[in-house]
Amino acid sequence: MVLVTTVRATIRLYAGVGNRQAPFTSGYGPVFDFVPDMKTSGAITLLDRPAFYPGQKGSGEVAFLNQAYLRHLDVGASFTFGEGRASLGEGVITEILLPA
């Protein structure tokens, strides 16, 4: 059984050269970084739009699949997300959701 931790967050997708050029939709599964070199898998569900474009800022729910690196999981904690080693966006936790 996989334990999932879900939070609400304000997220921003970076724009510009060297960043993601295409939008993403709910279910996007980047890697998340709370502490340098400690990445965890997860998925973003968009709350306020059907697609998220580079340069936009908005709300989403983030489900983290690996809790081993989530010691810094508090409201106000910031994180980056991306693909591989490249950070493509950032977020700030606004609410920690309790399991249903």
Image: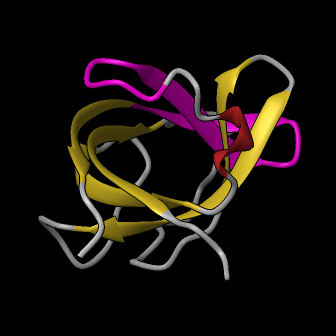
Rendering coords of residue 36 (x, y %): 78, 17
| Figure quadrant of the N terminus | bottom right
Q: Which residues are magenta?
A: 73-91
Q: Is residue 18 visible?
A: no
Residue ID at (70%, 34%): 69
Rendering coords of residue 66 (x, y %): 69, 55
Rendering coords of residue 38 (x, y %): 81, 29
Q: Where, by quadrant of the figure, is residue 98 drawn? A: bottom left
The chief SS type of the magenta part is strand
Residue ID at (52%, 27%): 79
Q: Is residue 81 magenta?
A: yes
- Which color scheme did the rendering employ for the protein? secondary structure
Residue ID at (73%, 41%): 68
Position of 88 relative to 45 (above/below): above
Residue ID at (63%, 51%): 20
**Who is closer to the viewer here, 75 or 11?**
75
Position of 59 relative to 85 (above/below): below
